[in-house]
Image (cartoon, coloured by chain):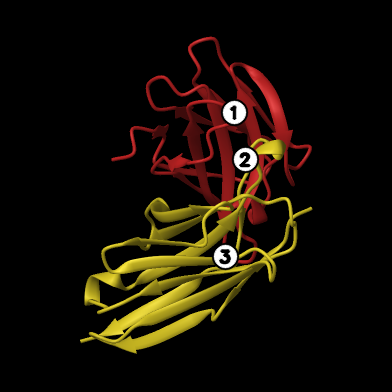
Amino acid sequence: GENVEQHPSTLSVQEGDSAVIKCTYSDSASNYFPWYKQELGKRPQLIIDIRSNVGEKKDQRIAVTLNKTAKHFSLHITETQPEDSAVYFCAASRSAAGNKLTFGGGTRVLVKP
Amino acid sequence: DSGVTQTPKHLITATGQRVTLRCSPRSGDLSVYWYQQSLDQGLQFLIQYYNGEERAKGNILERFSAQQFPDLHSELNLSSLELGDSALYFCASTRELVTDTQYFGPGTRLTVL
């Protein structure tokens, strides 16, 4: 089955700096890659997603890139703010498998003011 | 608010007991996914239902079962509970099988004492 690895597990950045989280996946048939932000005890919230027919997607301070050949995708957060502090999860799914999500292990991001 | 509701919010029970977690998908969504989030296993897919039928199974224990009712709400039944079953249980829903974007409910925190 699919396996998703996520790095780093923790990331501390200064407010205003950029944060980058990287994920690799094993199933070349995966075609959908969402990123979720989760605050302590709360539900995962979708922040951005990308499909396999697109190489890059941007939404304000957040961007995601996908390299299908290398089977990895990354989340980029620019101009980080204290409210960006949370745990971020990457995930992968494929429509042929009913779109069940396989998650990475998560990255705890701390933005220091 | 994602539109997905889950009850109860918290559940505290003893080992060996049985509990039922309930999920109501977003209005119009036909597919429901259940995920377990524990400290040591991360976010893991358990099971998926679509329009009342089981569509995909993940690493769901035999002690766990689920169903989706004609009104599309879903229940996850956990029996012979063990300490290790303590976790956050999330459900997510999508409109159709081919819809990849999943919106998560607020979760049920299960504590087994």
Q: Which chain is yellow?
A: A
Residue at 54% in and 9% down: B70
Q: Is residue B32 left or right of residue A68?
A: left
Q: Inspect the image, locate mark 2, and give the three-letter code of the amino acid beneath it.
A: Asn
Q: How many marks?
A: 3
Residue marked by disc 2 = A99
| Closer to the eye: label 2 or 3 | 2
Report the residue at 37% width, 63% height from top.
A40
Chain at numbered mark 3: B
First in residue order: circle 3 vs circle 1:
3
Name which quarter of the figure residue A92 lies in. Answer: bottom right
Which of the 4 quarters of the picture holds residue A108? bottom left
Mark 2 belongs to which subunit?
A
* Chain ID at mark 1: B
Q: In the image, residue A85 lies at what x, y percent?
A: 32, 73
In the picture provided, is A45 more to the left or to the right than B35? left
Do labels 2 and 3 touch, CB within 8 Å? no
Q: Look at discs 3 and 1 and give the one toward the viewer.
A: 1
**Colour given to chain B in the rendered image:** red
